[in-house]
Image (spheres, coloured by chain):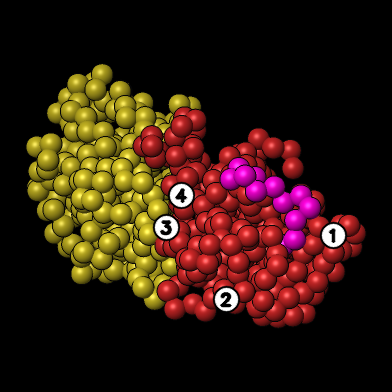
Chain colours: A red, B yellow
Amino acid sequence: MTPITGRTRLFGILADPIHHVRAPQAINALFAQRGFDGVLVPMHVTAAALPAMVDALRRIENFDGCVVTMPHKSAIVSLLDHVTDDARQVGAVNIVRRDAAGRLHGHILDGEGFVAGLRASGFDPAGRSVYLAGAGGAGNAIAFALARAGIARLAIANRSLARASGLAQRIAAAWPTVVTGTAGADASGFDLVVNSTSLGMRADDALPLDVATLAPSQTVAEIIMQPERTALLAAAAARGCRVQPGAPMLDAQVALMVAFMTGATGT
Amino acid sequence: MTPITGRTRLFGILADPIHHVRAPQAINALFAQRGFDGVLVPMHVTAAALPAMVDALRRIENFDGCVVTMPHKSAIVSLLDHVTDDARQVGAVNIVRRDAAGRLHGHILDGEGFVAGLRASGFDPAGRSVYLAGAGGAGNAIAFALARAGIARLAIANRSLARASGLAQRIAAAWPTVVTGTAGADASGFDLVVNSTSLGMRADDALPLDVATLAPSQTVAEIIMQPERTALLAAAAARGCRVQPGAPMLDAQVALMVAFMTGATGT
């Protein structure tokens, strides 16, 4: 990494908790590789502090953008000056660019990144059935990206059934060929099982679904980055499933994130 | 520098303009030397944006403190939760620590750093006469530190004569042995001539005093870091004066700044 000076462009990642994030390492490595004079730093901000933080980010003249992660992805949408159609449809933002006038533009890359990670490891979602745990920001992004990738069927499990049902209806409206519905803890029979909740970040978290319903024919994918091997992935591997950790989703997103924050994309 | 992660503590420097600041290089080098997992980044904030920025800094849980420089040193005093006696007396802050409860504590190190820099290069202020251009935040800090260091006489030049006169009166009240007064552009006869204004940062700035009044017996000191050789220093050197650039003042402050921001000092 080149030394930080008064001319270095500033980037951040907004999260709570913050210790587990991987974006600083991944994005600073890419900046260094490209000889770009920028630095991305962790900004640990609680949900209550988010509005004041977003207001301040508009006013930092050398601030160019930030990654947004849990628990801020949905809440930040209404705080920004503009969001892309993708982000509006999903109802979540995971990347923000600040333009020269101080306006903040939001976009979502979680879904694209998740599907790219699946494909890179040899799983093509086209025609498959999917069980999705979680209907929050990441769950929404993944559901829309999987629908765009041509899945046949999607069942959504969520603590709030209304939220699961609402997401299922929005997918059905946008992608009429996808059979959608809600689900409980039983993940049996689906080709792909995805955890998009935060359950698994802490050692004492409950499992996001009933792992006794998993079978060797299934692929189980996780969006949690740390721990790399969540309790869900460990249980799935023990039952003979193919497992996919959260890292590939971020790896596939890093270049897209940098392109969006530095204005290299037109979205 | 060690890679920035989600566990890295965040520090900043608030300035406008920002490109010339040296604190990121100096303080990050010291962090690296000590194996401290922290990073100091430039935060370019205008005077109008300062209140919102300070409000946000309180709410960044991994933010531990910042350096404050022009034009914010005086304005930030009333925005903080607590300032040291030194900072209150000077009416300016150049270093802030955030405690675990989110409270912001301000202190001023400019004066100590300036006097330490003078002494390190062999100039002892005790018993000397001083011409000081500028009665802003830095000028106040330097005036009080020079008075504490035992100068005999202090003349203050400032665009606003009332401000120069106000500082002269506060010095006289706190240090009755120092003969104080105001001055115009004529710096002749003083042992030490100090520029504490921002004149000299830009190539087309006016000179802060009448350089035709300078003579070889004088020492001319600058607080501007960049350019390293201001028009004042160039003119003073051409007239045979001993010159002191701004860098030593910061060099002497770096360790003190880190100690204050990381809570290693009791002040």
In front of the other: label 3 or label 1? 1
Q: Residue at x 64, y 64 (%)?
A: A193
Report the amino acid beneath label 3.
Answer: Gly
The quadrant of the image that shows the C terminus of chain A is top right
Report the amino acid beneath label 4.
Answer: Pro
In front of the other: label 2 or label 4? 2
CB under 8 Å between discs 2 and 1? no
Which sits earlier in the primary sequence, circle 1 or circle 4? 4
Gap in Å between the C-alphas at discs 2 and 3?
Answer: 34 Å
**Residue B251, how many percent across, how many down?**
23, 42
Q: Does the magenta segment cover residue A152?
A: no
Numbered tag placed on residue B172 in the rendering: none
Chain letter of mark 1 equals A
CB under 8 Å between discs 3 and 4? yes
Gap in Å between the C-alphas at discs 2 and 4?
Answer: 37 Å
Residue highlighted by disc 2: A212
Numbered tag placed on residue B6 in the rendering: 3
